[in-house]
Every structure is written in structure tokens, then in C-alpha cells.
Amino acid sequence: MRSAAALALALAAGVALATYDLRTDDTGIEVGLLLIVSIALAFVAPRRWWAIALLVGGFIPIFELWSSGEGVPAPSGGIALVFTVIGSLSGFGIARASRVDLA
């Protein structure tokens, strides 16, 4: 149940951040949002860290390709995906490190 909710939130955040990317040029805030969202959602559902990374950051290169008339997107889409993979792996690591074995 938590994984499904995390994936649904990742999808919504990915679409929202991709539309934000098309309307603004504030890269620092966008990178911060990508990291925060991917860390938080991967912490909630650590087994799905790879899907969360793709859903949060994968829409940015798709939207850039769709919106560019030339068919060649800017490299920032791929860089956004790299940041979400780093954030999701960090959330995965935090989730695994915070598990307590009381046995």
C-alpha cells in the first residue's frame, strides 16, 4: 500500500516538476525539489527507488523533447534524471540504515 501511494505521488510530482521546468529558469530550486521529493519518496518505499527516480525525473526530458521544435532536447533533462537517481539512492540508503534489528 505504501509503495503504491509513493509511486502515485512520484508520478504526480514528476508531471508537476516537468511543467515547472518548462515555465521557469530557476535551476537551483528545481534541483532542490527533485532531490527532496525523490529522497522522501524513496525513504517511504525503498524497494521501488528506481521507479521513483524514473517517475520523478523522467518526465523532464520527455516534456523538453515534446516542447522543442527542433527535436533535440537540452541536456538538462538527463541531468535532472541523474539528480533523481542520486536522491532516490540516498533515500534508499537512509531507509535501510535506519532499520533497527531488535532480535
Image: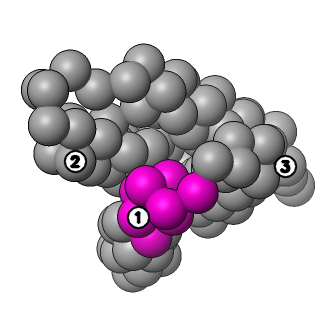
Q: Position of residue 100 (x, y in %)?
A: 85, 52
Residue 17 visible here? no
Q: Please tell me whether residue 36 is drawn above or below residue 58 in the rendered image.
A: below
Q: Is residue 82 left or right of residue 31?
A: left
Residue drawn at (61%, 31%) of the image: 83
Mark earlier in primary sequence (3, 2): 2
Q: Which residue is mark 3?
A: 98
The disc placed on residue 19 is: 1
**Tag count in the figure?**
3
Mark earlier in primary sequence (2, 1): 1
Mark earlier in primary sequence (3, 1): 1
Q: Marks 2 and 1, Cα distance to the nearest angstrom?
A: 11 Å
Q: Please tell me whether residue 60 is drawn above or below residue 79 in the rendered image.
A: below
The kind of residue tagged 1 is Thr
Q: Position of residue 50 (x, y in %)?
A: 41, 37
For the record, the magenta segment spans 16-24
Q: Give the quarter of the figure containing the N terminus.
A: bottom left
Q: How is the image coloured?
A: one colour
Residue drawn at (41%, 64%) of the image: 19
The kind of residue tagged 3 is Ser
Q: Which of the two marks, 2 or 1, is nearer to us in this view? A: 2
Q: Marks 3 and 1, Cα distance to the nearest angstrom?
A: 34 Å
Q: Secondary structure at mark 1?
A: helix
The kind of residue tagged 2 is Ser
Residue drawn at (16%, 45%) of the image: 66
Q: Which residue is mark 2?
A: 67
Residue drawn at (72%, 35%) of the image: 90
Q: Which of the two marks, 3 or 2, is nearer to us in this view? A: 2
Q: Is residue 94 left or right of residue 25?
A: right
